[in-house]
Image: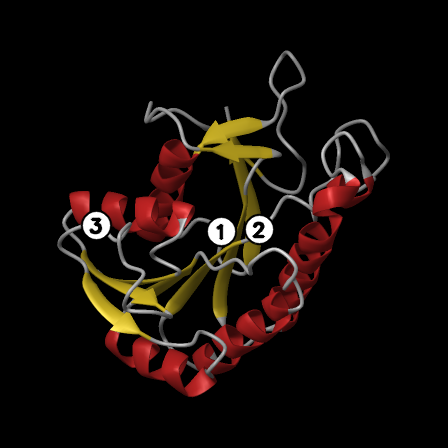
Amino acid sequence: MRIAVLGANGNVGCRAAAEALARGYRVTAVVRDRKRVANVPEGAAIVVADVSDADAIARLAREHDLLIAATRPAGGHEGDHAAMTDGILAGLKGSSARLIMVGGAACLAVPDSDGGLVLDDPRFVPPAIRPIAQASLDQYRRCQEADDVDWTYLCPPALLEPGERTGRYRLGAGELLLDSAGRSAISMEDFAIALVDEAEEARNRRARFTVAY
């Protein structure tokens, strides 16, 4: 399988690329700036591209079986999320290449809340991160409207941080996963495992899913 990782120099993207490489896949690391590739794992080919450019995405789609979009705008530039998402979806329109979009938890329902969204629960989304949470919800809605793209939307739990690679995780669908202590978390390393597992198994086509411990 030929995999292009958009945002491969980021925290999730570099781990997804490393996990895919470890399983023997051909990986292309897509970055905006060739000078910022310190996190890209050895063995990945590097391509410089603007992911909001639909033509650039279309070229990648012709050369790869799967695109993993692990892009995230810088703080204060949450509005860029829409342009990136639109570019990716437009570039993949009608393509045979699959897309796994690494999104946010905002679109998930909070357990025992009568359908209340994570976006609106201050336990999980304090005011400081509401702009990126709202941008992620808008991103998911754009995917839902893209009926001409073979997309999957992966929602992280409330807490996604660097940590240990255990190989362990639980799967969920439209509801935030909590452990027995009420915590919603997973390491980025195990998140990358779940991401590449989905790349291999394609269990959630044109649907969202989530993972956590």
- The residue at 60%/41% (across/down) is 173
User: Mark 2 — residue?
Assistant: 208
Q: What is the x, y in percent for residue 25? A: 18, 54
Seen as rendered, the residue at the extreme right is 114
Q: Secondary structure at mark 1?
A: loop
Q: What is the x, y in percent for residue 127? A: 79, 42
Q: Secondary structure at mark 2?
A: strand
Kindly report the distance in space between the C-alpha atoms of the residues bearing marks 3 and 1: 27 Å
Check the image and report above or below for 63 versus 9.
below
| Front-most of residues 35 and 68 | 35
Contact (Cβ within 8 Å) of mark 3 with mark 1: no
User: Mark 3 — residue?
Assistant: 41
Image depth: mark 3 or mark 1 in front? 3
* Disc 2 residue type (three-letter): Arg
Asked whether the viewer can see residue 132, the reply is yes
Q: What is the x, y in percent for residue 23? A: 18, 44
Q: What is the x, y in percent for residue 199? A: 35, 52
Kindly report the distance in space between the C-alpha atoms of the residues bearing marks 1 and 2: 7 Å
Image depth: mark 2 or mark 3 in front? 3
* Disc 1 residue type (three-letter): Asn
